[in-house]
Image (cartoon, grey):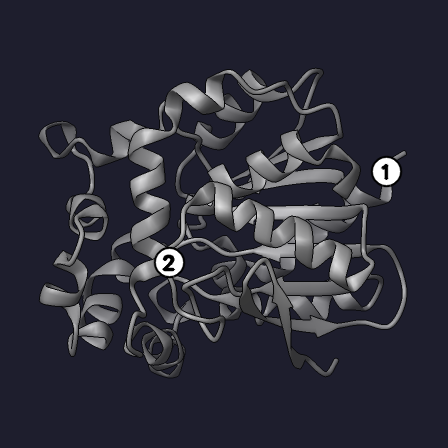
Amino acid sequence: MEITHHRAEVNGTTLHYAAAGDEGEPILLVHGFPETWYAFHKLIPLLAARHRVFAVDLRGFGDSDPGESDSATAAEDLHQLIAHLGLGPVHLTGQDISGGTVFRLATEHPEDVRTFTAIEMGLAGFGLEALADVTHGGAWHIGVLAAPGIPEMLLAGRESAFLGSYAFPSMLADPGSVTGADIEEFARTYARPGGWLGAAGLYRSMLTEGDDLRTRPALTMPVLAVGAGGGPFTEVTMKQVAAGPITSVQLDGVGHYAALEAPDRLAAALLEFVSRAP
């Protein structure tokens, strides 16, 4: 299945997205960190046999235009991208630090979202902030990325080392699932001028938006929670923000990067879920 690449001018920026599939209901894939659309390069062909599939580089990530961002801006970018492509409603699928972005989109524009899938995802206000607390086992890189100017100071020129020696292997169950070539593709775009701005903006949002997200309405569309290396964390989070019962899938023996480590199992779970959507 061929993956094609496109650019769309929306919301004052230009977003890059990959696409595959000629028919079926649209699925929109939204990456986390330290990722780009390429996090889904194994998953896209498996979904595109039955769906039109789109994987976007969020503002400031990948081959989208560099620029300051936050989860609210990124959510509006996605809303305008869906309208620009005439896709809505989509089967919205987000993972990791894109949680605030996709949750905002689904609560502000529920007409855009037919189903909501969360993969290894938490939300500020519902426990995600604990991951930044290094005194209780949290990740040091969150504070580094959120501090203005610090990612460029410490990581510029070290993108491959940071991603290949720390960010990916520290959360993989199967080290062989991410190759050296994969690391270089991710590092390529983080190494460009302004390459850390997207990640910095989403992590700053994570540390400040908890009160706002707690005031948002519950998700009314069908919700799927996919847990892997994070165990039940995604399921526990989604149960707090969904209006009704949710569907949960646990990918045992898989690390945090489910789309790279277990694309077949993840695709099976997604296809089963969306096929049952009313």
Q: Decide which of 33, 101 is in the foreground and name it.
A: 101
Figure disc tally: 2
- State the image quarter where residue 233 is shown: top left
For the point 29% across and 53% down, the residue is 200
The mark found on residue 250 in the picture is none
Residue 211 position (above or below residue 149): above
- In the rendered image of this protein, does residue 165 appear above or below residue 223? below
Q: How crowded is mark 1: few (under 14 residues within 10 Å), some or many (20 or more)?
A: few
Q: Residue 174 appears in which quarter of the rendering?
A: bottom left
Q: Which quarter of the figure has residue 55?
A: bottom right
Residue 120 place in picture, x, y as percent: 47, 42
Left/right placement of residue 35 relative to residue 170 reads right
Q: According to the image, label 2 marks what residue?
A: 198
Q: Where 247 falls versus 168 (above or below)?
A: above
According to the image, label 1 marks what residue? 276
Looking at the image, residue 83 lies above or below residue 194: above
Q: Nearer the viewer, mark 2 or mark 1?
A: 2
